[in-house]
Image (tube, rainbow, N blue to C red):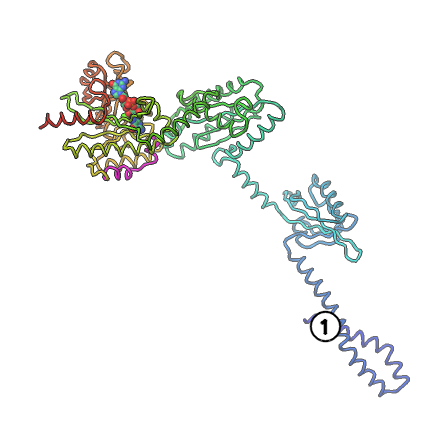
């Protein structure tokens, strides 16, 4: 406002100045003093509002201009007016800050950028000067005080009353690009090993498939999985697990050639993308080299740990039509390699996929069978060698499949475990065992404990509370149900297993380790778990008393159980010599054909009735 008033006065004075020069002289000369004064008064009266109008316009212009200048001075973007000859005509302070120099006016605009960018800038400038839509570039390098920064550039051309100006607007995007690149890195790299992650590997696979299709070439993917990884993290801790993964990543990386890409695609899963494979044999050779890289133990906390990876290989286009199918094929091959027992590799074969399909069909049939009530429990007695007393039963699942006879669990439990159906099926087994115990109680029999098998998956997904709820729903004393688990089940999620087993033990449910000696027999594990019984695996008992090694194993397990204060049960006892050996080594509870085959509930009930008579 102050400005506006000043201008008003200025305009007025200049008007008066003009009048004062010509008009008054004439009036004064011609008409004398009074008319002269009258004239001046009239002129003033006329000039005051007129000066107001002129002043108003000028003020608005200046005001506008000052506002624009103010904006120019204060915006974060660098604004540069470029003359037709490509030199800087005008600029704002942000431009000085961006380019790191005050002497911008007159400098060739393109020369303000890093050398490699100058051609590009000149081209953009030429395009911008031609008019039309503004031209833009997301990032251009600028050397500033020895450091490289990056700026976005937008060039537009303005035509004001026939006078054209080219305006360049620049923003420092160095930080933003850094963040974006970091985000991209995070999204595509595994944080721990720095290797490409699953998403990245998948998109590389897509690209490789497209390339192989176009060029008619072959490439391969190799999936690798560490079988004992979980055991290591559970016993040595998370950090040791991480160090192990870093070492594994480094060893794989060291075996592959520069063009092949190694990625980490899961907790302990790695993948190698094998670029161009003229011969499938190359993939096999690489698999062997990778496995050989694990001949030496990995040192963790001063102790050597052997890693036993398994590898599955699938080739494009031999084994799949697209990237997703190729990955599945490599995974299928990996599972086949794993089933052979670690430190193996396998090529994908069609039969493997057929098997996967069969498993799916079987899973469907199993679900239908449960709904149709085709499952039964058989009961196999556990007997004391001391007095032939019945100590308990193990509940064993049977499928009475119409048209197939009785299907044994070996044929469907592994599939149910793989598909996850085992959890539902296992719930049914526990329910049925409880129902049967209740029925025997209600018939006035004195039941013995019934052991149910809890699969690894079931153990992972169920809690002690679930088990107890079922038992108490049938009004059973908890001691009448026992649980058998395998070592492998514990290894997969030690902390959860520990909490389930502790919960069971707290209410008096006994827990046995099944198939003992075939899994990850680690004493440190056993000591930490609230167990009550070890069941010696049938395969060792089979070699007793003829096989020296089996005799050694069986007697060691019995001694170990004694040391850990656990009961011991021998499985698969078929012959009297086996029983004699076991009795001699102080294993007094046996389960096997010698003392009783698995039988339907009716026959098991008869055994209970006999027992009742004997004890009466
Ligand atoms: P397991 O838990 O080791 O059960 C013992 C297996 O040995 C049973 O096989 C039993 O019939 C068999 N067996 C018992 N005595 C002898 C013997 O003297 N000689 C020989 N050769 N075999 C004997 P089965 O019933 O075929 O069950 C096989 C496996 O299926 C079981 O092994 C267990 O791992 C699993 N299974 C059975 N029922 C269930 C269940 O309800 N749930 C789960 N998760 N698994 C079950
Ligand atoms: Ca068992
Ligand atoms: Ca067993």
In percent of width and height, residue 508 lies at 21, 35
The residue identified by callout 1 is: 6
Relative depth, front residue between 218 and 129:
218
Locate residue 236: give its quadrant.
top left
- Residue found 71% across the figure and 62% down from its top: 65
At x 56% / y 31%, what residue is drawn?
204
Q: Position of residue 548 (x, y in %)?
A: 27, 13
Which residue in the rendered view is the most extreme toward the front?
Answer: 403
**Circle 1: element type:** helix
Q: Which residues, given as a range, are shown in magenta? A: 456-472
Q: Which quadrant would residue 340 be assigned to in this image?
A: top left
Q: Percent from the top left, x then y, of residue 8? A: 74, 73
Left or right: 18 as drawn, with respect to 170: right
Furthest residue in direction top, as rendered: 546
Helix, strand or loop for the magenta stretch, by majority:
helix
The reply to whether the magenta stretch includes residue 412 is no
| Quadrant of the rendered image holding ligand 1 | top left
Q: Residue furthest left?
A: 616
Residue at point 77%, 54% (across, down): 159
Relative vertical location of residue 287 with respect to residue 229 in this rendering, above or below: above
In-front residue for pair 37/57: 57
Q: Position of residue 228 (x, y in %)?
A: 39, 27
Image quadrant in which the N terminus is located: bottom right
Q: Residue 471: within the magenta? A: yes
Left or right position of 91 against 607: right
Is residue 103 visible to the viewer in this orientation of the structure?
A: no
Q: In the rendered view of the protein, which quadrant contains the C terminus?
A: top left
Using the rendered image of the protein, determine whether residue 268 is visible from the camera's viewpoint.
yes
- Graded by Cα atoms within 10 Å as few (under 14), some (14 to 19) or many (20 or more), the crowding at tag 1 reads few
């Amino acid at each position: 406002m102050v400005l506006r008033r000043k201008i008003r006065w200025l305009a007025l004075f200049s008007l008066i100045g003009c009048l004062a020069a010509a008009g008054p002289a004439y009036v004064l000369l011609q008409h004398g003093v009074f008319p002269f004064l009258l004239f001046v008064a009239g002129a003033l009266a006329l000039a005051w509002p007129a000066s107001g109008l002129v002043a108003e316009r000028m003020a608005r212009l200046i005001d506008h201009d000052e506002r624009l200048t103010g904006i120019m001075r204060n915006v974060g973007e660098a604004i540069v007016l470029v003359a037709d000859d490509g030199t800087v005509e005008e600029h704002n302070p942000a431009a000085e800050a961006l380019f790191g120099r005050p002497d911008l006016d007159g400098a060739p605009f393109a020369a303000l950028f890093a050398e490699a960018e100058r051609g590009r800038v000149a081209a953009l400038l030429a395009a911008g000067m031609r008019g039309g839509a503004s031209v833009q570039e997301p990032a251009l390098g600028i050397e500033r005080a020895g450091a490289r920064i990056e700026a976005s550039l937008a060039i537009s051309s303005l035509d004001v009353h026939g006078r054209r100006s080219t305006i360049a607007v620049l923003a420092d995007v160095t930080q933003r690009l850094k963040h974006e690149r970091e985000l991209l890195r995070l999204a595509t790299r595994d944080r721990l090993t720095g290797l490409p992650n699953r998403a990245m590997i998948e998109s590389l696979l897509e690209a490789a498939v497209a390339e192989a299709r176009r060029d008619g070439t072959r490439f391969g993917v190799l999936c690798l999985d560490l079988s004992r990884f979980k055991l290591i993290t559970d016993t040595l801790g998370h950090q040791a697990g991480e160090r192990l993964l870093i070492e594994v990543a480094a060893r794989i990386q060291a075996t592959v050639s520069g063009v092949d890409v190694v990625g980490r695609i899961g907790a302990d899963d790695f993948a190698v993308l094998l670029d161009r494979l003229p011969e499938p044999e190359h993939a096999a050779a690489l698999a062997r080299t990778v496995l050989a890289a694990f001949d030496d133990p990995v040192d963790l906390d001063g102790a050597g740990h052997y890693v036993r990876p398994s590898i599955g290989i699938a080739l494009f286009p031999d084994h799949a039509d697209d990237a997703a199918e190729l990955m599945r094929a490599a995974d299928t091959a990996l599972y086949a390699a794993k089933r052979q027992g670690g430190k193996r590799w396998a090529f994908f074969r069609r039969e493997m996929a057929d098997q996967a399909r069969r498993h799916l069909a079987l899973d469907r049939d199993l679900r239908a069978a449960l709904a149709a009530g085709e499952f039964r429990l058989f009961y196999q007695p556990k007997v004391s060698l001391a007095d032939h007393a019945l100590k308990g039963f193990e509940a064993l699942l049977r499928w009475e499949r119409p048209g197939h006879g009785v299907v044994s669990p070996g044929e469907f439990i592994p599939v149910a475990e793989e598909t996850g159906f085992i959890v539902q099926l296992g719930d049914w087994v526990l329910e049925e065992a409880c129902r049967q115990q209740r029925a025997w109680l209600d018939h006035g029999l004195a039941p013995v404990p019934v052991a149910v098998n809890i699969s690894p998956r079931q153990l992972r997904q169920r809690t002690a509370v679930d088990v107890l709820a079922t038992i108490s729903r049938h009004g059973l004393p908890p001691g009448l149900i026992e649980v058998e688990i395998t070592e492998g089940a514990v290894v997969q999620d030690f902390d959860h297993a520990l909490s389930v087993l502790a919960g069971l033990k707290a209410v008096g449910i006994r827990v046995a380790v099944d198939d003992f000696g075939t899994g990850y027999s680690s004493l440190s594990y056993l000591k930490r778990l609230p167990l009550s019984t070890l069941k010696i695996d049938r395969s060792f008992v089979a070699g007793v008393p003829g096989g020296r090694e089996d005799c050694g194993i069986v007697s060691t397990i019995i001694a170990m159980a004694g040391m850990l204060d656990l009961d011991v049960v021998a499985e698969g006892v078929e012959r009297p010599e086996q029983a004699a050996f076991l009795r001699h080594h102080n294993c007094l509870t046996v389960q096997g054909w010698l003392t009783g085959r698995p039988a339907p509930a009716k026959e098991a009930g008869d055994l209970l009735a006999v027992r009742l008579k004997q004890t009466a």
